Image: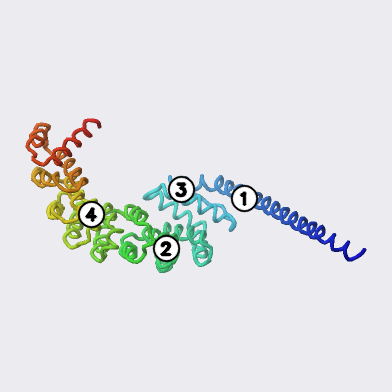
């Protein structure tokens, strides 16, 4: 065969090689998918077997006492802990205490400690949750060290583990982390504080807000919804008196829900930022009284539409406000914008 013929066959050979490689890769992917499906089904069968064997024992422990336990294979630890946590999350008091004892007898403390020292994130998360539920003081330092974990999911789980273990001891450390852990969703932390209880959360939250700068306050003010209403009102009043940033002031006013904050709210009714004046009017709708009628009447004539709108809504919603009083005010208003806004709010209420 001459050189010309060989050169003509070269593209065909290349195509055959490429096709063979593609077929091998496709076959390899198919085998991998089949193996993955087989492994998933196998794990699901193991999980179901663990649940069938251990759920009755866990429920028996929750209801009465820890029954005699069968041995637990190491390969079933994941399924066991997952099932245990699902049941434990719905229990309180003695029932949860007995379930903890069952987990200890099954050797889960040692498993969780080993997983926590490992590198797998999923197992470390499960270990943190398990050790938090078990609440052994010997694990405190290991759990606390995880607060500095770079991954927010792991550090947050460590925070919950500490709170589950000893909420009173944990909360000052956990709440203080919020000054630097901007990657922690405040809503998640608020849920954690509610779980611990308003009484224990109050002092750490108040201490945190006293240290927070304006930027941090914007992020952390929602935590006030977790603590006692009176304490929250005093904290908001302090923020309203010391902060100058209009954005922070507006955010603080939006969280006002107790009459104890009224003096601080009223003091901002003439603030130069319209967003602050609008939130003052909204706050007076929630906590105002007859003494605020004059302030709201003046705000209904504000140059900003939103201030007028919230002021009109607050005036109409004040305790003791009658339809006759609103009608008299509307007729006596010399400001056309205030009169029109009051009319609009009354029309909205009729539609509702």
- Using the numbered discs, state the Cα–Cα distance from disc 2 to disc 4 in whole angstroms: 31 Å
Image quarter for residue 270?
A: bottom left
Mark 1, residue position: 40
- Using the numbered discs, state the Cα–Cα distance from disc 1 to disc 3 in whole angstroms: 23 Å
- Using the numbered discs, state the Cα–Cα distance from disc 1 to disc 4 in whole angstroms: 52 Å
Mark 4, residue position: 250
Inspect this view and state whether residue 200 appears: no
Image quarter for residue 293?
A: top left
Is the C-beta separation of discs 2 and 3 under 8 Å? Answer: no
> Please, what secondary structure does the residue beneath circle 2 have?
helix
Label 1 or label 4, whichever comes before in sequence order: 1
Check the image and report above or below for 318 versus 19: above
Mark 3, residue position: 87
Task: Between residue 184 and residue 158, name the one nearer to us.
Answer: 184
For discs 2 and 3, the disc positioned in front in the rendered view: 2
Mark 2, residue position: 155
Quadrant the C terminus occupies: top left
For discs 3 and 4, the disc positioned in front in the rendered view: 4
Q: Which mark is residue 49?
A: none
């Amino acid at each position: 065969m001459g050189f010309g013929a060989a050169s003509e066959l070269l593209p065909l050979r290349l195509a055959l090689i490429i096709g063979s490689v593609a077929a091998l890769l496709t076959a390899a992917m198919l085998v991998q998918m089949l193996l993955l499906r087989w492994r998933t089904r196998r794990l699901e069968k193991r999980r179901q077997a663990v649940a069938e064997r251990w759920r009755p024992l866990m429920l028996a422990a929750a209801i009465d006492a820890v029954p005699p336990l069968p041995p637990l294979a190491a390969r079933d630890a994941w399924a066991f802990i997952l099932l245990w946590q699902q049941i434990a999350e719905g229990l309180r008091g003695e029932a949860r205490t007995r379930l903890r004892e069952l987990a200890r007898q099954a050797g889960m403390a040692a498993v969780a400690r080993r997983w926590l020292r490992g590198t797998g994130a999923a197992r470390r998360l499960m270990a943190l949750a398990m050790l938090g539920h078990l609440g052994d003081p010997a694990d405190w330092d290991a759990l606390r060290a995880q607060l500095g974990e770079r991954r927010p999911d792991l550090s947050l789980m460590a925070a919950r583990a500490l709170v589950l273990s000893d909420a009173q001891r944990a909360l000052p450390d956990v709440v203080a982390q919020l000054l630097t852990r901007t990657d922690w969703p405040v809503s998640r932390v608020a849920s954690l504080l509610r779980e611990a209880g308003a009484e224990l959360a109050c002092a750490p939250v108040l201490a945190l807000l006293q240290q927070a700068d304006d930027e941090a306050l914007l992020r952390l003010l929602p935590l006030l919804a977790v603590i006692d209403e009176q304490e929250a009102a005093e904290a908001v009043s302090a923020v309203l008196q010391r902060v100058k940033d209009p954005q922070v002031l507006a955010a603080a006013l939006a969280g006002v829900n107790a009459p104890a904050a009224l003096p601080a709210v009223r003091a901002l009714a003439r603030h130069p930022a319209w967003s602050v004046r609008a939130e003052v009017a909204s706050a007076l709708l929630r906590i105002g009284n007859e003494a605020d009628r004059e302030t709201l009447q003046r705000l209904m004539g504000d140059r900003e539409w939103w201030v007028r709108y919230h002021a009109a809504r607050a005036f109409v919603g004040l305790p003791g406000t009658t339809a006759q009083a609103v009608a008299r005010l509307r007729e006596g208003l010399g400001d056309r914008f205030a009169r029109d806004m009051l009319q609009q709010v009354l029309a909205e209420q009729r539609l509702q």
